[in-house]
Image (tube, rainbow, N blue to C red):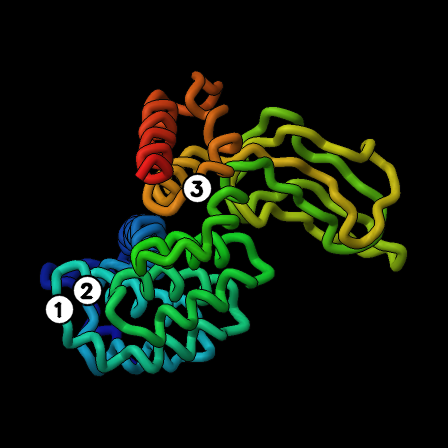
């Protein structure tokens, strides 16, 4: 024990009992630095976990596509395949069987992303077949991506879905219970935004989230009223991005009977930029030219 104390003594013979006092500020500084490092690191780790820009090699891509436990890994791989296709990299064709399998995934986000990816290669017939099935998907965003992708195949089968994208979207109650209002008419929402809460008959509170982006046009029930399952609750005006994509799709495959759905967008619309009215006019002209021919 005396040897240990001697080893800790200072070279000038000062008492070792002073060391703990000197080390307290140093320890506090270390703790502060650790906290600062964690605070700095956590946002980076979150960003890294949600970012699809990290490059994957072929082995990683195949592994991510087969990762049933972590859907975001599969989304990452799908995004990488789309990016490589946009650069003309045909080597990604080796992953097409896995992409087709994900088109039937129970995870909505994977079906949605897969529909988008399949539209990047309109030369692959099995993609065309799968996208036609996607038009009947129960989730709107999967149907919408499938309809837009089919335009790249020169297929107008998704035309009714493109018209659907231009019209207000009815959001229905996921379960029965007491409606607890959270937002108001005019509020903008994204996919996943909490719209309201529902108190179920079993005294549970269920979150009611938006399946699509848009702007609240109407709230049909009164706050505190009793909802039935699948009852229409919200009407959402379509957001600009989806209107823009639908108009561009109809530019190529629209028919004269679609003009009544397109024409309102030729006028200035609150919340939508001027590019929408210009695209609507061009889409109408394109449909009329085709009809004339």
In the drawing, what numbered circle is on residue 255? 3
Q: Quadrant of the C terminus?
A: top left
Q: Is residue 33 left or right of residue 192?
A: left
In the drawing, what numbered circle is on residue 85? 2
Residue at 62%, 43% (x, y): give it: 194
The mark nearer the N terminus, 1 or 3, is: 1
Contact, mark 2 vs mark 1 (Cβ under 8 Å): yes
Q: Nearer the viewer, residue 250 or 268?
A: 250
Judging by the rendered image, the residue that carries numbered circle 1 is 89
Residue 41: percent from left, percent from top:
30, 54
- What's the CA distance linking mark 1 and mark 3? 35 Å
- Does any portion of residue 150 appear in the rendered image? yes
Residue 64: percent from left, percent from top:
33, 77
Q: Nearer the viewer, residue 289 or 24?
A: 289
Q: Nearer the viewer, residue 127 or 221?
A: 127
- Does any portion of residue 21 appear in the rendered image? no
Residue 159: percent from left, percent from top:
46, 49
Secondary structure, mark 2, is helix
Residue 193 appears in which quarter of the rendering?
top right
Q: Is residue 146 left or right of residue 172?
A: left
Q: Is the residue marked by circle 1 packed among few (<14), some (14-19), or many (20+) residues within 10 Å? A: few
The mark nearer the N terminus, 3 or 2, is: 2
């Amino acid at each position: 024990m005396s040897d240990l104390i001697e080893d800790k003594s200072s070279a000038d013979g000062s008492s070792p009992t002073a060391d703990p006092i000197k080390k307290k500020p140093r320890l506090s500084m270390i703790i502060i630095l650790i906290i600062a490092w964690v605070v700095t690191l956590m946002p980076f780790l979150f960003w890294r976990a949600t970012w699809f820009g990290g490059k994957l090699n072929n082995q990683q891509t195949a592994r991510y596509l087969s990762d049933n436990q972590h859907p975001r890994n599969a989304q990452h791989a799908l995004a990488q395949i789309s990016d490589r296709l946009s650069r003309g990299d045909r080597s990604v064709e080796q992953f097409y069987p896995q992409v087709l399998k994900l088109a039937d995934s129970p995870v909505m986000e994977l079906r949605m992303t897969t529909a988008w990816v399949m539209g990047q290669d309109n030369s692959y017939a099995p993609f065309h077949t799968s996208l036609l099935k996607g038009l009947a998907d129960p989730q709107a965003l999967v149907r919408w991506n499938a309809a837009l992708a089919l335009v790249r195949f020169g297929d107008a089968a998704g035309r009714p879905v493109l018209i659907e994208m231009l019209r207000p979207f009815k959001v229905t109650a996921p379960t029965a219970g007491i409606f607890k209002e959270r937002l108001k008419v005019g509020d903008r929402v994204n996919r996943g935004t909490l719209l309201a809460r529902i108190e179920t008959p079993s005294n549970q509170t269920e979150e009611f989230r938006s399946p699509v982006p848009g702007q609240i046009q109407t709230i049909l029930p009164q706050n505190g009223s009793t909802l039935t399952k699948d009852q229409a609750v919200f009407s959402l005006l379509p957001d600009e991005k989806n209107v823009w994509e639908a108009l561009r799709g109809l530019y190529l495959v629209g028919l004269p009977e679609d003009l009544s759905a397109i024409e309102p967008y030729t006028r200035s619309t609150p919340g939508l930029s001027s590019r929408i009215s210009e695209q609507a006019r061009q889409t109408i002209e394109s449909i009329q030219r085709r009809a004339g021919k």
